Amino acid sequence: MKAEFEVIRNKNIDKLMDMADKKSVLSLAIKICSQAKALAPVDKGQLRNAIMYKGNNAKGAFNDRNGEEADHEIEIGGLASDKEMCVGFNLKHGIYQEFGTRKMPPQPFLRPAVALYQGQNAVDIIKKIHDEEMRGPLKAGMTRETFV
């Protein structure tokens, strides 16, 4: 199962892309990746080690922490430019941790990490994580918190 997250492009993306340079995009990807690793639930460390950033000319953070190693990097399609990066994981059980199942409550880590760097208030994001975890396993008709 390929688990990738793509930040929804807003209407100002062209303006943002013009302002960005390769170095700033890489810096943002590293920050989001680090925050996601900090928020990721850890048992043996494989999920945390699977979180990485990758672009046309740069990649990193794969298996950079202690714990069980992840076995393969994220796969990305052709990115349009060097100003684009992906942050994600390629681990089957990661998607269940992020969104939960009908038997397991969610433990979001990637969506909140992205939200923190989209200028959202950290206190609100922490509250959303707590609220989502407290709802417990997914039941019919339930919706999850929207981070991005």
Image (cartoon, rainbow, N blue to C red):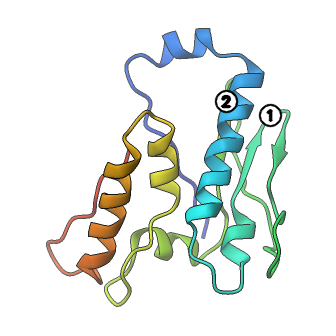
Q: For the residue marked with disc 1, what is the amino acid?
A: Asn
Query: Local crowd at mark 1 within 10 Å, few (<14), some, or many (≥20)?
Result: some
Query: Local crowd at mark 2 within 10 Å, few (<14), some, or many (≥20)?
Result: some
Q: In the picture, residue 54 is in which quadrant?
A: top right
Q: In the displayed structure, would residue 98 be above or below residue 22?
A: below
Disc 2 to disc 1, C-alpha distance: 8 Å
Secondary structure under tag 1 reads: loop
Q: Quadrant of the N terminus?
A: bottom right
Q: Residue at x 65, y 71 (%)?
A: 91
Residue at image mark 2: 84
Q: In the picture, residue 83 is in which quadrant?
A: top right
Residue 120, position as x, y percentages in the image: 38, 38
The residue at the far left in this view is: 141
Q: Give whichever of 64, 5 is nearer the camera.
A: 64
The residue at the far bottom in this view is: 103
Residue at image mark 1: 56
